[in-house]
Image (tube, rainbow, N blue to C red):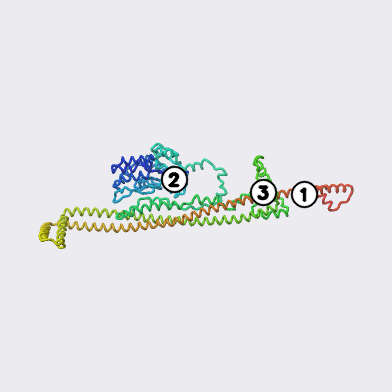
Amino acid sequence: MIKLIAFDLDNVLIDGEAIDEIGKLMGVESKISEITKKAMEGDLDFETSLNKRVALLKGASVEDIREVVFKIPFMEGAEETIAELKKRGYKIATITGSFEIIAERMKDTLGLDYAFSNILHEEEGKLTGQVSGPLVKGSKAEVLKEIMEMENIIAEETAAVGDGANDVSMLEEAGLGIAFNAKPVLKEKADVIVEKRDLKELLEIFPDENSELTAKSADEKPSEEEEKPSEEEATSEPEETTETVEEETTEPEKTTETVEEKAAEPEKTTETVEKETTEPEKTTETVEEETTEPEKTTETVEEETTEPEKTTETVEEKAAEPEESSEKEPAKDEKSSKDNKDDEEDKKDEKEKSEKPSPDVKAEPNPDAGKSFGELLSNKKELEKQLKVLTKERDDLNENAREFKKTRDELNASIKENLDKALKYRDERDQINKEVRKFKKLRDETNQELKKMEYASGRRDILKIQNEIDKIEKTIETKVLDMRKENELVKKVQDLSKTLSEMKEDEKVQTEATALKEVSEAHHAKVVEFSDKAQETHEKMLEYFKNIDEVRAKADTAHNTFIETREKASAKHEEVKAVLNEIRKKNKGLDKVKAKERNIESEKSKKKNMAEKEVAKDIFEKFKEGKKLSTEELRLLQKHNIV
């Protein structure tokens, strides 16, 4: 049953290519469209095509891009289809080589569970022409596997919907691949092809499992066999599943803008964050399937021994019984139950004979054939000793496996805790960065106004003349000049001083400029203050991601040891089952020997009775002739109903 559906973004969830629309801002849409076409048809690898297209966007305004991408319409039926699929219980993801700026909009608007995309790098509100993210070098199949691990599902429980060559790996990985209005290269790989550009067509492919189950329970009454749980299901205890970090693991994929004044360094750390936050979930698998499986494969001995009890006594009860039965004649009711068991054994023997292969096929020899009751009982006791040892070994392994699982789950919980804290600091840093950008913008606007005011007040010219006077005076003081040259410089200083004395700065403008300068300095102080806070928070976030790596390594070790121990327990359980099977055979052999002994005793008793009856007849004939009878002879006649 499908549990997760992964969608491509461009031309699937939205009606258009985001990068083509952004290209129109820079007048390079035709070049980008040409590269996109080659990539979608499989003529150009995705990484190369993406880097080429993003390089063409260098210098584009981030604000303008936001306006453009928010105008791209949804694909026909996208909103209704996603809402209905989520209502039906499916998890929804978008895995796209497009950009976070549009993918996050889709996640928020449509209520997607996961959004994996790439990140456009920016500096001071402009694109740098660089891109990073999980889908630059990685494939969509790898991202789909990460989501599967987070959701604890297998490939057969996933579906993928795409339209181009870069979706091939995702469709091949998923249990169900759907080509939606796709290129030929993808149609060849798809299980289902949808030609109509309307996502509502998918609702026919993904039924409402809940409603179907309800209808089935109303219309069909399960048979007794279906209603009765199997012995395994009735006795096995449900394993707790480790919690998966669903939303948290996708969050780190978002662009984490860094402090404006330190833009270069945080760019590198952002990529580290992305890489580190996607990996922990990969190694800390939830073991829903794996933890339930050992309960099936490592059933307790008690479960196994309940089955042979239907035809023979339990191992423990039967161990002592054969010795008693050889000395004592069983009571009538015991004999009756034994006869019933013998009848059952006979029926089984007849069934086995009917199922025997043809004479041409040689039957396997019975190793217990010809063995006496004592030999079989001795063999059985040895097997019971062996069973006890094996059962203890298996139970010890199961206990060890549970301990390793517990350790692994505790480490997984620690990873989740570290991830939550890292994400908390990331969000806090992003909020601080908003303050940095706000005060930087205010500072820059104030500085621009200050420059305009200085030009308008004449202050710039006054400062320029004053600087020139200072420069000439310094030359006169520090250099050895001839008299003529020195006189020329002195004359120039006098002329400039005269000009300076005639220039007056507008006092009102000067006052306003001073006030603006103070405001600008205050804004700059805030920029520095918040930048430091943002950097400090960013380092705390990275510290928690580092902790995740360390805990993840321990969780890997615990998980691998758990799997190894569980496999050993399963193997040991197979040995337990084999010994139990041998004990069953010995029990069956003992029953047959006992039955044979009873038959022999019965024959002896019958012959004895017949001989006594003949003697009784002779005595009776003599009695009729007048012979007197002794007490013993009279009892003999009464025993055989002659008198």
Q: Residues within 10 Å of mark 3 (few under 14, many from 20)?
A: few
Q: Which mark is residue 604?
A: 1
- In the image, taking residue 567 as reference, residue 619 lies left or right, namely right
Work out whether 83 lies above or below 393: above
- Nearer the observer, 220 or 595: 595
**Residue 172 on image: x %, y %:** 44, 42
- In the image, taking residue 3 as reference, residue 624 lies left or right, namely right
Q: Amino acid at mark 2?
A: Leu
Mark 2 or 1, nearer chain start:
2
Question: Do the numbered discs 2 and 1 sit on residues whose CB atoms are within 8 Å?
Answer: no
Any part of residue 321 in sight: yes
**Residue 146 on image: x %, y %:** 43, 49
Question: Do the numbered discs 2 and 3 sit on residues whose CB atoms are within 8 Å?
Answer: no
Q: Which mark is residue 367?
A: 3
- In the image, taking residue 628 as reference, residue 548 lies left or right, namely left
Q: Which mark is residue 52?
A: none
Q: Which residue is mark 2?
A: 4
**Residue 599 on image: x %, y %:** 73, 48
Q: Residues within 10 Å of mark 2 (few under 14, many from 20)?
A: many
